Amino acid sequence: MSVALEIGGVRVDAGEIVALLGGNGAGKTRLLETILGFHAGHVMLFGRDVTSLAVEQRVRAGIGYVPEARRVFAGLTVRENLEASSSLPARQRRQRVEEMLRAFPMLGERPDARAWMLSGGQQQMLALARALMSRPRLLLLDEPTLGLAPLVVSDLLQRLVSMTAEGTAILLAEQRAALALGVAHRGLVMSRGQVVKSGPSAELAADPTLADLMAGG
């Protein structure tokens, strides 16, 4: 299995979901932002050292990002949000938008609705669809289930699982350990900016110290 990402003690393989666990202030978001290039840090992406590359270059190299709190463009329509996230030529961009609208029926039903009019679940699906516009090989998600209804969470997580069958590598930052470990192959627990525990998802889920580690901040 090829390695998609290496940064410090964190590794994500192609076709694998790795759960990045920890409470508020544990360092999950900063790690994701370091991978993207917003902070200094040595990053290997698909076997290539991208440490010196700018954010936009890393995105073009194959990273997709779904930030915490969605951060969609509230005043733009669903279709416009998707178009704005792509640098493809116009014809290919339109084709990719239509693919995303078919892949996410709840968006396909409201392509001309402005993002602020969407429910939380619809906005999260829009944020995910927007990240997928560039067909990323590595997908970073920051607290994607926050504030969502259980049915929407289930749909979102199953979509992530299906993506791994196509070889996509996923780093899923979550506070809800049980949810993340339920779909992840492996898990990492962060506290104060450091990975303090790692292992197969089943082992971490059964670890009686997990709650204490998660609370460590």
Image (cartoon, grey):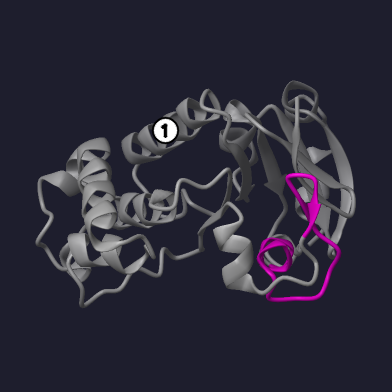
State the residue in front, 11 or 115.
11
When the figure is inspected, residue 84 is found, relative to residue 185, above or below; the finding is below
Residue marked by disc 1? 159
Q: Measured from the top left, where is residue 160 in percent x and y?
A: 48, 35
Q: Measured from the top left, where is residue 144 in percent x and y?
A: 48, 51
Residue 199 left/right relative to 147: right
The C terminus is located in which quarter?
Answer: bottom right
Q: Secondary structure at mark 1?
A: helix
On whether residue 210 falls in the magenta region, the answer is no
The N terminus is located in which quarter?
Answer: top right
State the residue in front, 48 or 101.
48
User: Quick check: can you spot residue 20?
Assistant: yes
On whether residue 46 falls in the magenta region, the answer is yes
When the figure is inspected, residue 86 is found, relative to residue 101, above or below; the finding is below
Residue 159 left/right relative to 139: left
State the residue in front, 137 or 152.
137
Image point 11% across, 63% down: which residue? 113
The segment highlighted magenta reads 30-49
User: Quick check: can you spot residue 142?
Assistant: no
State the residue in front, 21 or 50.
50
